[in-house]
Image (cartoon, rainbow, N blue to C red):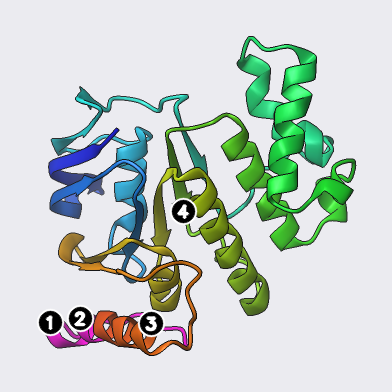
Amino acid sequence: MFIKINNASKTYKNNNRDTKSLDNINLTIEKGEFICLLGPSGCGKSTLLNIIAGFDSPTNGEVIIDDKSVKEPSPNYVTIFQNYGLLPWRSVKKNVELGLEVKKISKEEKSKIADEYIELVGLTKFSKHHPSQLSGGMQQRVAIARALAVDPEIIFMDEPFGALDAMTRMNMQDEISNIWEQKKKTIIFVTHDIEEAVFLADRIVIMTPGPGKVKSIINVPMKRKRDRTNEEFLKIRDRVFLEFKMKEEIEIEYSI
């Protein structure tokens, strides 16, 4: 499984004017990689994610996954958004089982798979609770468990922790990093937080604003679990920050 983005551009028409959101994106992502798309608001990183996932189409160029051109969303890939997308009338377990209901598996197997992933995200004691009874971080764990339960080949994550408070966000970063180590899924993660990208990614794809281009790609050759106070971590974080400042004067949100 690999993803190849070839000369992808995206132009929107607005009041008879063309607005280019993405310009000539070229990128290859290997199977099992954790990639962070990093950039300021308006740089087109969510647009790029939607194009790779098949929710949108490039004006020019193409996205190829496993030698097939992406034309529409696939059941083999899942997307996790910032708003969780849980069904409030369903329990945690029933929410996690949702994607399994289209599969031809027994009720017992469906229950077993749901229990496995609820345990993986540390919510076994809450399997009968409803979303309204859970914190924001716990709801996001349910969304992650639901996504993993269908055994996707690729997980797309669009700023999934953006609405969480700082401590909960750090805990969720730990969670998704641990899950990636266990499951080795291909993850494409959109963020505007430099420290989050350094903590999570194998490679950080830095994008420029208006229109979005790939400015540079920075490898993060650190083993997990990563220490945010480690000297190597801080060096990579500072390098990413300088990458923004040295090449363009742009406004970015920078977290320490």
Q: Amino acid at mark 2?
A: Glu
Q: Which residue is mark 4?
A: 158
Q: Amino acid at mark 1?
A: Lys
Q: Quadrant of the N terminus?
A: top left
Q: Amino acid at mark 3?
A: Phe
In contact (CB < 8 Å): disc 2 and disc 1: yes
In this image, 129 relative to 53: left or right? right
Q: Amino acid at mark 4?
A: Asp
Q: Nearer the viewer, mark 4 or mark 2?
A: 2
Which range of residues does the magenta coloring cover? 242-256
In this image, 188 relative to 177: left or right? left
Of marks 4 and 2, which one's residue comes earlier in the chain?
4
Of marks 3 and 2, which one's residue comes earlier in the chain?
3
Residue at horizontal 67 percent and vertical 12 percent from the top: 105
Q: Nearer the viewer, mark 2 or mark 1?
A: 2
Q: How many marks?
A: 4
Q: Can residue 160 be seen in the rendering of this structure?
A: no
Report helix, strand or loop for mark 2.
helix
Of marks 3 and 1, which one's residue comes earlier in the chain?
3
Mark 3–mark 2 distance (CA, rounded to whole Å): 15 Å
Residue at horizontal 17 percent and vertical 38 percent from the top: 59
Name the mark on residue 243.
Answer: 2
Q: Which residue is mark 1?
A: 247
Quadrant in which residue 106 is drawn? top right
Q: Which residue is mark 3?
A: 233
Mark 1–mark 4 distance (CA, rounded to whole Å): 26 Å
Name the mark on residue 21.
Answer: none
Report helix, strand or loop for mark 3.
helix
Of marks 3 and 4, which one's residue comes earlier in the chain?
4
Q: Nearer the viewer, mark 3 or mark 4?
A: 3
